[in-house]
Image (cartoon, grey):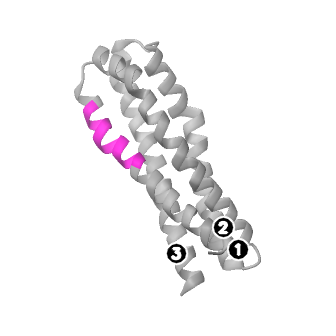
Amino acid sequence: MTLRLIFNILAVCGTCIFTGVLLTIGLTLGSHWKSLPPAEFLDGFAKNLRFIGRTLPVCLTAMLLGLVGSLWLGWSNPEQRYLWGVALVCIVGHLVITSIYNGPMNSQFASKSIPPDRVAAALNTWLTFHAVRTMLGLVASVIAVLAVTRYTC
């Protein structure tokens, strides 16, 4: 097994698993959260945020390692450099949105520092940004698959 193959596997599997986790959060948990009264949502979010916090870092680490390694090893091929670079830019975009909005809002939800009358609007905005983050992950996943199939086919 070559180093390129290892990085490619990490990139493809990492981005796909990461995106699957994001989809689950958005579609399953998001719908559930919207159905709850504000106080119940805040209590549940504070109590259960740690479970999401366990999953995403593992996927994120594998994905970033794979994308950066694949970009590094494909650097001499312009098409590979472009594809891996675009996939990595998508994930960087995701991380920027997370650090600017979703992460800080997670802290506000978990600490219950947001007034109950603002929870519904804040959650809707959170889910909108989460959908953008998920789409960036999906695009990165598709591009990673394309990068691998273009290299091997």
Tell me which corner region of the image, top left, top right, bottom left or bottom right, holds residue 79: bottom right
In-image side of 138 versus 24 (left or right): right
Question: Is 86 or 53 nearer to us in this picture?
Answer: 53
Assign a secondary structure to mark 1. Answer: helix
Q: How many marks?
A: 3
> Does the CB distance between marks 2 and 1 fall below 8 Å?
yes
Tell me the distance, in whole angstroms, between the alpha carbons under discs 3 and 1: 13 Å
Q: Residue at x 75, y 72 (%)?
A: 75
Residue 89 among magenta residues: no
What residue is pinned by disc 3?
146
What residue is pinned by disc 2?
70
Q: Residue at x 47, y 51 (%)?
A: 18
Tell me which corner region of the image, top left, top right, bottom left or bottom right, holds residue 114: top left
Tell me the distance, in whole angstroms, between the alpha carbons under discs 2 and 3: 13 Å
Which residue is farthest left?
A: 35
x and y percentages locating residue 27 in the rendered image: 30, 44
Assign a secondary structure to mark 3. Answer: helix
Q: Residue at x 66, y 64 (%)?
A: 85
What residue is pinned by disc 1?
74
In-image side of 12 versus 42 (left or right): right
Which residue is farthest bottom?
A: 153
